Image (cartoon, rainbow, N blue to C red):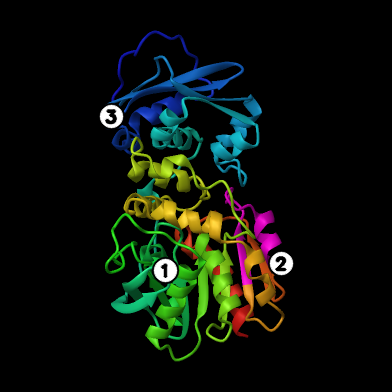
Amino acid sequence: MTSINAIGASAVQPVPLTEAARDRLLADPRLSELSRGANVAFELAAPAGATVVAVRAGQVGFKGEPTFGVRAASDVWARLLASEPKAGDQNVHALALAGEVELWGDSLTIAQHLHLLHRVLEIARSSYPSVQADAFAHRPLGFRGEYVRVDVPNLGLCDIYVERAGAGTPLLCLPTAGSDTKQYHGLITETDLTDRYEVIAFDLPWHGKSNPAWGRRSSSYRLDSAAYVGAIVAVTRALALSKPPVLLGVSMAGAAVVEAIANHPDLFAGAVACQAGPRVAGRRTEWLRNAAINQALHIPEWTGVLMAPQSPAEMRDRVWWGYSQGGFGAYDADIGYYSESWDVDNVSALLDQRSPLIVVLSGAYDTSVPTAASRELAETIPNSKFRTMPELGHFPHAENPAVFVEHLEWALHKILD
């Protein structure tokens, strides 16, 4: 990335960015790529001084008049920019909600430029990974794709894309809000899970390779409990599996698998619910369907800070790209289910000690569903187990499948043994 001249005049100190961090900003190809089309300056301020980062058309400089910024005490900056921040400290928005960081400026401008703020903060860490430095096992893919035509409550007739790999006990995997089956590719290519399990994933209607329901407008997608659980049940029955599958769901899908077990205990062997709480609030914002916001940039940034910074950069980047591909309104509608339809109190009366076992797993770096919330969910379910995943975040299955599989195998043994 090349340097630009001052946009206005401002004397700045390299605080909280070190000179080395400023050099990395100038040299970072990803920041250059993300900066195309941008014309903004923002401030990172500590009591001892401030750094202004000015970006214009793929170029960066350190002088200008900021339109938004981050202010924090020196010790908070030290936590936020640590090479391996503690769980929760990696997310500037979580720190702002906790009152430890002041995120000032016009909210629309901030939402439009999250991709630049987040990348600058990532580069500022004393040790930040590159995609090229990561090494992966790359086992053979072995995918088998097919479509099943099913009727889904409240949605109608749908052609749903299903992807399968491996052999053994069926593991029916559900992606996170707004995402698709690609989130589970890492479990197939970077672990040996498919030596023992048939990994099956499907795209909800309006997601991935599944088109909108027949006769429905592309912009009319809505999701509620009846539709979500109905889709899980319909696909399971259409596949005519040799034995009841174990459900694996993450985020909103972690809630859906609890609802599926509660309403159809005879259809499933059990469930692994990741990153789910008894109810969730605060994830649906006005920016998710705003015409002034580039959804292909904003949504992956809104979700990406929920991952552990130590997770491989290659895998985190793939999660980011998956969210950049999402259809307009799909993520917002999914979060509508998670925020407005899901509540464990709606199904708690259907769960007892005879229900199939539900294992609740919690990635410690997830600030949208803190570990305390997942533990509360597990305590609400009579037949449940709980485990914290200290090195993972909101997308454990996708951001670091090689680490997640150890927790998953523990959960599967609890369910199947």
Residue drawn at 34 percent across, 13 percent down: 6
Left or right of 142 in this view: 402: right
**Three-letter amino acid code at disc 2?**
Thr
| Quadrant of residue 39 within the rendered picture | top left
Which residue in the structure is indicated by mark 1?
A: 154
The one of 311 and 226 positioned closer to us in this rendering: 226
Whether the magenta-drawn stretch holds residue 90 is answered as: no
Question: Which residue is denoted by mark 2 in the rendering?
Answer: 380
* Residue 337 can be seen, yes or no: yes
Q: Which mark is residue 343?
A: none
Assess disc 2: are there few (<14), some (14-19) or many (≥20) residues with their C-alpha within 10 Å of its C-alpha: some
| Residue 308 at x, y percent in the picture | 53, 50
Which mark is in front, 1 or 3? Answer: 1
Amino acid at dot 3: Gly
Q: Which of marks 1 and 3 is nearer the N terminus?
A: 3
Look at the image and give the residue range highlighted in magenta.
Answer: 359-378
- Mark 2 or 1: in front is 1
Question: In the rendering, which numbered label is found on residue 58?
Answer: 3
Q: Which residue is drawn at 32% across and 72% down?
A: 158
**Residue type (three-letter) at the residue carrying disc 1:** Asn
Q: Tag 2, which secondary structure?
A: helix
- Of tags 3 and 2, the one toward the viewer is 2
